[in-house]
Amino acid sequence: MLVSRHIDGAVAARAPPGLPNLLVELSPFLFSPPQLLDGGGEVEEVDRHDRCPGSKVRVPDERVELPAGFGEAFLDGVEPADLLAGEAGSVLACQAWAPCKCQRLRGWVGRCADVRLHRSYRHAQAHEPSKWAGPYPALSMLDDGVIKRVLAEALGRGGDLAELFVEDRRSTALRLEDSRVEDVSSGRDRGAGIRLISGERASYAYTNLLTQEALLDAARSARAGLSEGPVEARDLRMVGASSTAAVQVRPEDVGAGDKVAALVEADHAARIKGDAVRQVISSYADIRQRVLIAASDGRRAEDDRTRVRFAVQVVAGRDGQIATGFEAPGHSGGFELFERLPPAELGSKAAAKALRMLEAKPSPAGEFPVVLAPGTGGVLIHEACGHGLEADTLVKEASVYAKRRGDRFGSDIVTIVDDATKPGSWGSFGVDDEGTPAQRTVLFDKGVLIGHLSDLRSAGKIEAPPTGNGRRQSYAHLPIVRMTNTDLEPGQDDPEDIIRSIERGVYAATFAGGEVNPATGNFVFGMAEAYMIEKGELAYPIKGANLIGNGPEVLGVIEAVGSDFDRKEGVCGKDGQHAPVTNGMATVLLGRMTVGGTEA
Amino acid sequence: MAELLELARSICERAQGDEQIEAYMVHDRTFQAKAYLGDIESVSSAEPRGAGVRVVTGHRTGFAFTTDLTPEGIDLIVGDARSNAAFSTPDEAAGLAVPGSPPPEVPGLFDESQTRVTPEQKTGFVLELEELTRAYDSRIRAVEEAVYADSSSEVAIATSTGIEGLYRQTDSWCYSLAIATEGDDTEVGFEFALGRGLDQLDPGDVARKACERALGVLGATKIPSNRMPVVFEPYVAGQFLGVLARALTAEAVQKGRSLFAGKLGDEVAAGLTLVDDGRIEGAPGSAPWDAEGVPTQRTEVIRGGILDSFLYDTMSARREGKTSTGNASRGGFKSVPGPSASNLAFESTGVGRDEVLRQAGRALVVQDFHGVHSGANPVSGDFSVGATGRLAEDGELTQAVKEVTIAAPLLVILSRIVSVADDRRWLPFGGSFGGSTTLVSEMTVGGL
């Protein structure tokens, strides 16, 4: 059942098994940047893989340098220093950790010592790879004989297409709050779903067991209700996947200690920003999902997807005011994410946002010009344009964009693209969950609607080739049309000039999320960080601001597009399923928008 | 059925030395059908099951889950949970729940007759729901989604500290999403029903309400920005409670992310009483025991306007030397437990819906919130969301309104709730919340 607890407890859900979460099921679309992975950030989708040698630590050959700002607190503890001084290559018992005298890190430092020793996975791998890598059994990809028997069974009473989706998912999630590692979680999830399409109907059945018997049972469940003669499946041939970025440091080869270290670094960096920092929640999640897709039309494809995401949320408080700030980057790839984005920087940035927002005044309500900061504003494109161009809503004419291909919605500066082939991007993959290779699709070309996104079924209905946007949350779900990495392409304008051109308006620095109704195009976005623009300058931060409007109309009010393109990661919810996506955009000027706030 | 508990026990028997082990197991049988334009669009059925294991050792907690319930699969995750524990920070409050008073009988969780409903009856139901929605009014252009779903679940828990439990429950629900068009204007309305069995769902009622919600806001316009009374329909009152609930757990307070921190004993609402009760017959969040095996109970969170208690699970209770209020929850076997509300609702102030509308004078009656997940912040207390609804003038609904925002700090909204009608319904918005027609004396409406 689709119930998730956000990392900030945002959708803390008490839901006995069986109870639907209508927030997820019924809200047409949700986009939640703070949510870590597709299952809800916390544990739903997670797995672990740490093969740290338990209570023993091997001291690497070189002394490990502590990051700046970390040392003093660290050295307050006695035992950790002893640990560090340990002879290279020796094995010390970790039980000796002392509680830290540093109030900021509290009981943490002992653990940090351990962490620092583990810190360099390169060392670890160089010195004792087996202990760190651990057993990671290959997905026992079913042999073609079993696959054919299962597809044949599914088509035993007729049908147009039978498809098998096999998935093996491992992940880990760690969460630090109150400077303590609270949840260290892992999961092993494996299963297969069988889809049978017959005319307008898709039947789906899935199982956790990957035995031939269980799969044949599922195939029989999927064909229930049909009563025609058997249909023959075509021979399987491998579909070539779009090339994906190589994973440089496999998360399962990284000790949990290193993952904890990343959390601690972010926590510390946030806390040293000032006494007003009241709480820091940092979360780490990685997932490795391997899938196999085989269908009676001969498609056979495999994909091996590794994603890592890291989130820091900071709560700051002063004089009765409370404000929050967050950073939540992720990518398709491994632990090397932190080489590009050091955890300390993320913690520091999130804290700075929260502290700035402490000074915020209530947002005015009314109509204003709105400047969207690079990256974050992409959610607007995702909600206002992307969802309405998903072919499943188009064919139901449940989209404001239905039958409007060729129409102009914006000026020449508006070009919007969905692209699952961006190497290393959070929303990328090799093949989609129906085995169609990832591709790049232009939705709006210089303001004119020219494209759409589709999966196999909706593509069939509109008689166009599928665009490789058929995705599913897991083997328990039917594939549906989803976005991947959706960008408003950068323009020529100087971002500074854009702000300078505004006499009085709102600068949306970070959106907390958004929601759209594709049938009407109406959307709402909450701003987590925003500023009033007065006389061409960011005058002061505002809180409680949101942006409300209509998708097709907003494209028409895009008056300037900057050159400073950036992309933000998020988790998109649709039909109760989550998918990792990114949204990209440069600094953008919207001529006139309704802003909601508390000051009438 | 007893097998699940037997399996849970066998997991706990793997405890070594002074470590504690908890096994939480779920075995579901699920079904879902969608209808579109008179045809079944999709049917999905499955029998998912799995185990989530917590190991507590030396005040450290680790968790792992699996869908592989073979002895080897279980061995693997017990090992995983054990090594995960080694990386958590020791916490004096960590530890599994211990047996206490026996759990209450919660009648009506399991509807035996539901197990005899055939797939054909279920697909027939959803076809009827779709047809009734489509045919309701000539302005209903399409039914974006008509869905029927159900599940029959067994939930078992066993701990090495001596807790054991097993219960069964059935759930059935359906919803319809109607699209109404008139001229250039398109509006969407949805409605759902939730029960323990298909026979408790009324497709005609769901279809009618979905359509009325869409038709009622056709021709809606913005209104000028203003401060005015706001009436929450039960549907949005439930969502509002969902936001408050996030700040009402002891964990949120202890960790400095609740707007109610430090307000225990303060007057936070004008005379209202807010109750969490995990044992209400017919309420969706009811169960004999919570996600840690602790019996559910009734807790007055706000009593007569005074903030009286937070909601506790075992760990947050130990931290304060208290006992759990039976409010541990988890989203299935893949999640660690944490505290949250069970069935949370305001007691009615003893007025009917019509009376509330009359009291409101000239007010905005909100039928739908938009962007609650981003516009409501239970940490800072900011609340600013999009709204669709109608204007009310002295008890009569008049002009339809859309694309406006409503805003006020959460605590201010709470203090300005002057009436809660007696028309409560349970809403599953990431939990179970009782929404009633609710009058807030003033909010900022942002429009033209």
Image: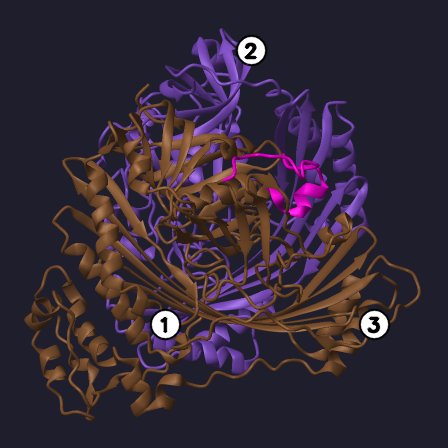
Chain colours: A brown, B purple
Q: Which chain carries label 3?
A: A
Same chain shared by disc 3 and disc 1: yes
Q: What is the chief secondary structure element of the magenta stretch?
A: loop
Residue placed most toward the observer, A270 or B282: A270
What is the C-alpha distance between the residues marked 1 and 2? 58 Å
For residue A130, above or below residue A375: below
Under mark 1, the amino acid is: Phe
The residue wearing badge 2 is B398
Residue B15 image point, x, y percent: 39, 78
Residue placed most toward the observer, B63 or A510: A510
For residue A406, above or below residue A346: above
Q: Is residue B92 visible?
A: no
Q: What label does residue A233 carry, if any?
A: 3
Helix, strand or loop at label 1? It is: loop
The residue wearing badge 1 is A335
Residue A408 shown in magenta? yes
State the residue at coordinates (59%, 63%): A438
Q: What label does residue A400 carry, if any?
A: none
Instruction: Please give the range of residues in magenta.
Output: A388-412
- Count residues near mark 2 (Cα–Cα under 10 Å), then give few for <14, some for 14-19, many for 20+: some
